[in-house]
Image (spheres, rainbow, N blue to C red):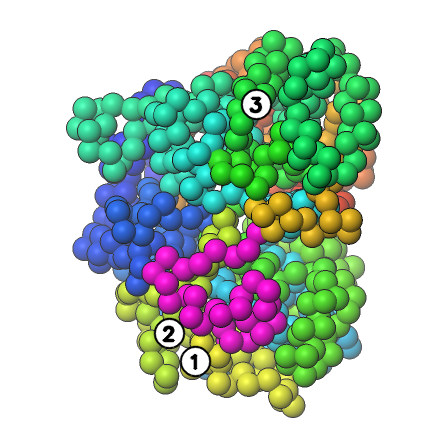
């Protein structure tokens, strides 16, 4: 636990600036990598260097300036740390003892150095040879009654080459069970958007920000989750482009921001006011806002004003009449009540959108993590389609994804619902018949563990058990397994909540060199705007006993599939052979992969809607209707609040860099509850009081988290927020979007229970 006493104070300085510079220097010193880390930062996101292991935002320019942010520096520092988790560490600490430590403490122990196997007799991890580790995996997998009894997880940090081979190995083994981190964040984009525009990706490239006439940011916090995005936003604002931020809690970076690479701003302590309109929406109110904006547009059209792009609608879309009928059915009092906004502000937002001839709408997990997140994404597409905001400069839809290659993993085969055309290509290229039935997404994989049908879990990166919902039940699920395998750079909770047999397999990190018998190798990464670039590590590996993720996948396959005709051994040494196979399976988008990747800035994958081509059944973009104004099931309890789980500023997914959340004014604490002052008063509570949260569910289970300190914060009424993963125990496993399987972590129905008074 943090040594200092918790402190809470309002942060009033601009985001970025000297605060970000100081935080970068501090983390490099904490990890004792000032010189090494500084040199590596100069190579991050540069031609010939490596891609940031943090967010998926694309590089603004690979030649003009440094291309890293505060959070990218933190991710690198923790990856390049001098601290090591050795066999002596595991000999000293039992698994039971390690379970008592915090996630932050586990993170701070440093890099894993050699493969380890769990010894149940002593409750310790003990060293194991790589050969014995792979043999153990092969024995467990071959002993299963069905390949579908194994779950194969993928983290978004996994490079394209590794993810592709992993997908081939698992399908040759005989299953499509691919729970992955996309299931927990942007799966509504992957599953919902294709029905609208024919592809489950964004349509915007970075140059579009230079041509946009309006930018809407819905349900995401760029200053913490994608800080490099702040540069194009600040530049757009300086040009006078209106920026509308829609969020239940104001985020400091979208209020005022100082660019750390702007010498004048830094020298003069200047800053830019980023948001021209802050829309203080209630949790789940985004659908009402979007429909309210469309209602204004239909009203103006009815009054004789040309608001819509009628030529675009007639040539490129279908379903307009159904949308018109749905919007006509929505009444203003209901829209206002559902959104938590006043009608005047909704009309101002509509006016900004109407006046713009080129609009970008960016969105994050505040949109996707609802029970109807897929349909909510489709409503954003509806709004853009009405004015033809696809296939022209400065316009389009832009999901802001988190993990650095989560989109790329999906592109190259990490998909529990693969298309039949893709499976045909795998058959033709690799010469085996892949399984044709859908596999498990994340929630389904946990359910399979709970009911005993899953026996083996292999985690290619990530911290699965801390990321998934319903923490207590998920812990129970993992402990029922026969084998768990954690492939990772750092120790985390997933290695401590394990099966009867368990392995920790340490890997070479993104920032480290890959040397094989064929020479130095590189991997490729796809960012959130569909750019594919090479990534070459520049640091020495943390230990001589590490293997690459690619070699681990190949050797698992060789141990499990002794009669395989796939050239696993050759792929260990020569990654160009893997890229040739990727191009063979995906000729439409990866043709000429070997030559195209030689370009210093990589290449852009084809996104048909940018050409106004729609890969839908009827060849048109489709207006899709979501009746009503709710994106989550109603709850009868009048005391119900909607809880959004969020990251702190010093955090990336489940990785905790410190106990501080600078921009929200929280220091040395993570057990806090951000709450509107009026909601606090209504419950006869006070800021600083200790409370518990209980989930309001109809499944009979009691989900409760104790010891939360109330922080009065400008939340929208009826909305509260607290940190992830600490509040994951409140998220029921069954509370998810049925279209995509994405947990509804931004709309958990809870009640506040008083525990102690202030003081």
**Which residue position holds label 2?**
521
In the image, 706 versus 532, the foreground residue is: 532
Mark pair 2, 3: CA separation:
47 Å
Residue at 57% across, 16% down: 351
In the image, 25 versus 256, the foreground residue is 256
Q: Is residue 649 rendered to the left or right of residue 728? A: left
Q: Quadrant of residue 338?
A: top right
Report the residue marked by disc 3: 353
Residue 243, above or below 471:
above
Q: Residue 693 placed where, x, y %?
A: 63, 30
Number of marks drawn: 3
Foreground: disc 2 or disc 3 = 3
Query: Of circles 3 and 1, which is in front?
Result: 3
Inspect this view and state whether residue 388 appears: yes
Labels 2 and 1 touching (C-beta < 8 A): yes
Q: Earlier in the sequence, mark 3 or mark 1?
A: 3
| Percent x, y of residue 222 | 45, 35
Residue 471: tell me if it is visible. no
Instruction: Say if the magenta span includes residue 41.
Output: no
Give how far apart the Cα atoms at labels 3 and 1 are: 50 Å
At 52% across and 57% down in the image, what residue appears? 605
Q: Position of residue 316 (x, y in %)?
A: 70, 40
Q: Which range is magenta?
A: 578-607
Q: Is residue 439 above or below residue 132?
A: above
Mark 1: secondary structure: loop
The quadrant the N terminus occupies is top left
User: Looking at the image, which residue is at 34% across and 20% down?
Assistant: 12
- Element type at marker 2? strand
């Amino acid at each position: 636990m943090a040594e200092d006493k918790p402190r809470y104070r309002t942060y009033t300085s601009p985001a970025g600036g000297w605060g970000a510079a100081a935080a970068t220097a501090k983390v490099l010193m904490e990890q004792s990598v000032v010189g090494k880390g500084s040199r590596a930062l100069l190579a991050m996101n540069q031609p010939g260097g490596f891609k940031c292991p943090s967010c998926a935002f694309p590089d603004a320019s690979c030649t003009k300036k440094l291309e890293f942010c505060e959070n990218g520096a933190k991710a690198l520092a923790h990856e390049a740390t001098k601290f090591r988790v050795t066999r002596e560490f595991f000999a000293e600490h039992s698994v039971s003892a390690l379970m008592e430590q915090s996630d932050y403490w586990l993170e701070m122990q440093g890099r894993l150095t050699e493969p380890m196997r769990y010894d149940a007799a002593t409750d310790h991890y003990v060293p194991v040879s790589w050969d014995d580790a792979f043999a153990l995996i092969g024995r467990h997998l071959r002993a299963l009654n069905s390949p579908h009894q194994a779950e194969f997880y993928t983290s978004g940090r996994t490079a394209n080459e590794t993810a592709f081979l992993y997908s081939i190995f698992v399908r040759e083994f005989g299953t499509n069970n691919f729970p992955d981190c996309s299931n927990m964040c942007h799966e509504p984009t992957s599953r919902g958007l294709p029905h609208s525009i024919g592809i489950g990706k964004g349509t915007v490239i970075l140059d579009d920000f230079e041509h946009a006439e309006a930018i809407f940011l819905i349900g995401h916090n760029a200053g913490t989750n994608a800080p490099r995005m702040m540069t194009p936003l600040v530049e757009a604002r300086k040009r006078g482009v209106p920026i509308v931020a829609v969020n239940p809690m104001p985020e400091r970076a979208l209020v005022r921001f100082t660019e750390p690479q702007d010498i004048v701003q830094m020298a003069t302590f200047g800053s830019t006011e980023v948001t021209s309109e802050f829309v203080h929406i209630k949790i789940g109110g985004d659908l009402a806002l979007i429909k309210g904006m469309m209602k204004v547009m239909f009203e103006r059209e009815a009054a004789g004003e040309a608001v819509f792009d009628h030529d675009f609608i007639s040539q490129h879309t279908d379903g307009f009449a159904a949308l018109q009928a749905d919007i006509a059915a929505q009444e203003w009092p209901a829209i206002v009540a559902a959104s938590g906004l006043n009608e005047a502000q909704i009309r101002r937002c509509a006016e900004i959108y109407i006046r713009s001839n080129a609009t970008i709408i960016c969105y994050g997990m505040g949109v996707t993590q609802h029970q109807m997140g897929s349909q909510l994404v489709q409503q954003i597409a509806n709004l853009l389609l009405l004015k033809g905001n696809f296939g022209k400069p400065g316009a389009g839809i832009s999901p802001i994804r988190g993990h650095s290659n989560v989109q790329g993993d999906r592109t190259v085969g990490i998909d529990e619902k693969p298309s039949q055309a893709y499976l045909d290509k795998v058959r033709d290229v690799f010469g085996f018949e892949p399984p044709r039935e859908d596999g498990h997404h994340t929630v389904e994989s946990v359910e399979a563990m709970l009911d005993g049908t899953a026996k083996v879990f292999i985690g290619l990166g990530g911290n699965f058990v801390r990321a998934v919902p319903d923490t207590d039940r998920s812990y129970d699920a993992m402990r029922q397994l026969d084998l768990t395998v954690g492939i990772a750079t750092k120790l985390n909770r997933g290695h401590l909540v394990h099966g009867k047999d368990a392995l920790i397999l340490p890997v070479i990190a993104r920032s480290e060199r890959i040397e094989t018998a064929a020479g130095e190798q590189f991997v490729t990464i796809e960012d959130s705007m569909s750019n594919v670039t090479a990534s070459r590590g520049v640091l020495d590996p943390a230990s001589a006993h590490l293997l690459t993720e690619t070699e681990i996948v190949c050797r698992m396959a060789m141990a499990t599939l002794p009669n395989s005709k796939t050239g696993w051994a050759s792929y260990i040494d020569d990654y160009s052979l893997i890229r040739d196979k990727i191009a063979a399976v995906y000729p439409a988008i990866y043709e000429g992969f070997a030559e195209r990747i030689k370009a210093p800035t990589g290449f852009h994958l084809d996104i048909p809607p940018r050409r106004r081509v729609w890969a839908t059944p009827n060849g048109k973009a489709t207006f899709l209707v979501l009746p009503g104004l709710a994106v989550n099931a109603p709850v009868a309890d009048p005391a119900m609040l909607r809880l959004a789980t969020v990251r702190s500023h010093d955090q990336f997914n489940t990785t905790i860099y410190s106990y501080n959340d600078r921009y929200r004014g929280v220091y040395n604490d993570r057990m806090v509850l951000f709450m509107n002052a009026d909601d606090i008063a209504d419950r006869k509570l006070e800021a600083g009081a200790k409370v518990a949260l209980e989930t309001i569910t109809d499944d009979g289970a009691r989900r409760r988290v104790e010891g939360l300190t109330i922080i009065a914060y400008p939340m929208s009424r009826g909305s509260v927020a607290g940190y992830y993963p600490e509040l994951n125990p409140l998220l029921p496993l069954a509370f998810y979007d049925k279209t995509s399987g994405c947990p509804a972590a931004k709309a958990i129905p809870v009640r506040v229970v008083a525990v102690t008074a202030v003081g």
